[in-house]
Amino acid sequence: MSFDGIAARAMAKELSSQLTLGRIDKVYQPEHDELVLNIHTRSGNRRLYATVDSAAASIRLIESSPLNPPQPLSFCMLLRKHLQSGRIVSIEQKDCERIIEFNMETLNELGFTVSRKLIFEIMGKYNNIILVDMQTGKIIDAIRRISIDTNRPRAILPGHRYDYPEAQDKIPFSEATREDLEQAGDTWKSILSHIGGISPAFARQLLIEPDRYGYLQQVIRSIDSQDFVPRVYVDDSDTPREFHIVPLQEYEESCRVITFPTLSEAMGFFYEHKKSSNRVNQKSHELVRAVNKALNRSYLKQQRLKEDLLSAENSEDLRLYGELLTANMHRMVSGMKEITVTNYYNGEEVTIPLDPRYSPNKNAQNYFKRYGKAKTAVKEKGIQIEENQRNIDYLESVLTYLENAEDIKEIEELRTELEESGVIRRRKQNGSRRRRKYQADPRKFVTSDGFTVLVGKNNRENDVLTLQIASRTDYWLHTKDIPGSHVIVRTEGREISETAIFEAASLAAYYSKARTSENVPVDYVRVKYVKKPSGARPGMVIFTNNRTVYVSPGLPEKNR
């Protein structure tokens, strides 16, 4: 596990240096397993983020605020009651465990100062955030309640006494002597079984160090003095493999190293980019399923409409039968089931079915009537096919945005778009809340020769980007006949370069359904030639005077 006792010690030091004596302004709970504290400190406002999600459990500082639910969850309301306006007295690591404690002073309902402890346990499947009354030692509540039936040795319930997890039969890394490390064995697994608070990756690094004790003491001193360089190791596909505060030799040659000024930034990058712990996939699953369901309905409807259109187009026989019956009316009598006549267009014999319930004249008129309906159907079915195809194009574009989404905010914006388009039902909102006016926040890139490139994240943003933000002299790009984002190159009075066109086209291909393809066709044209038809779906435009380039998807070199 990446977040081991050593990383916890480093994080406790980092948080202590920035948050101690800070005052808690706001408490939020974006998800059932996430917590955000807005903390006012002498150096400015800070946001503390913690999650007990088993795939991405961590505690760190963040810059942007996650989206919050319309109504706060119960644990959030409890923390607001007990911690809001409270002051952080100290932040400490429990021994060498993955437990970080926030000791706080706050006021109770009577105005008396009381002590509270907010405990963050980052311990695999037992991850938890627990609020404890320090005077009684009892649990006020936890983000995850654990009954005695679930975990008999240690129940986490309001009113129960808080007990630390049972200590492992290992020597804490901060207490290990030279003899302990020398006797730990000659494999990383034996080191891991003897020394507590270290991860397998750190154990493997310790194994190759000639002076294990000296190296470990050096690491501890670097943590205490905050003189360490957090790093993340990413593979050839830019997927994070590991992070730590020390170099890990096993990853140095096989992976690319990205260093960060703080451990919070390193952990944020690691967990946000690691696919196995990516919350975006989890959040988008419901929407992807809803869009696919709507798409399947539209595909089936399109197939049936085309079958109906084909049947309507093959209706000339109906007109012919009507004409032939009219010409041979003298040969017909009521009650006939069919009649064979000569087709005067080619001289061939034709057998025409008749309805014995109707007169000869009525049978002829029925054929003319069916022919007229078929000709009307050709026009109507054609219109319906075009409309349904536009719906398919729209849903496929939304599906592409869901697959390419990079954060939770993008997913929520796509959810809102689908609600407004009627694809999914609107969620119940708190009656006192008003829906915020949509504000575009496109992705921003810079080409190697200095042109700014903006990329839409959804169809609503595409409309704003193309029709409001872009000027007439800017350039608009989009993958040819492939769902994807609108891409705008800001010219700012300059003549666009070939380099900028190709790099922007690569971005358009990257943020499209053709991300994994090669030689993707991308249309480009000045914005003044891009128009939105009246009544068109979000993101749907028409354009003229375009040219096409073929590129491979990718990001500009300086933006990677």
Image: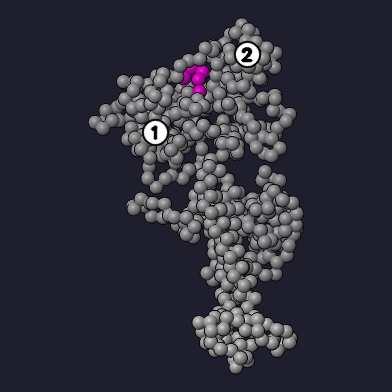
Task: Check disc 1 and give the amino acid type.
Answer: Arg
Please say if the residues under marks 1 and 2 sit with CB atoms less than 8 Å apart: no
x 41%, y 32%: residue:
143
Q: Marks 1 and 2, Cα distance to the nearest angstrom?
A: 44 Å
Q: Residues within 10 Å of mark 1 (few under 14, many from 20)?
A: many
Residue 227 image label: none
Which is more N-terminal, label 2 or label 1? Answer: 1
- Residue at the left extreme, as displayed: 110
In this picture, which residue range is highlighted in magenta? 94-98
As drawn, 272 above or below 149: below
Residue 190 image label: 2
Tally of numbered tags: 2
Task: Check disc 2 and give the amino acid type.
Answer: Ser
Q: Which residue is mark 1?
A: 23
x 56%, y 63%: residue:
301
Q: Tell me the quadrant of the picture where the C terminus can be found.
A: top right
x 50%, y 82%: residue:
357
As drawn, 248 above or below 351: above
Q: Position of residue 39 (x, y in %)?
A: 43, 35
* Residue 211 can be seen in this image: no
As drawn, 140 above or below 474: above
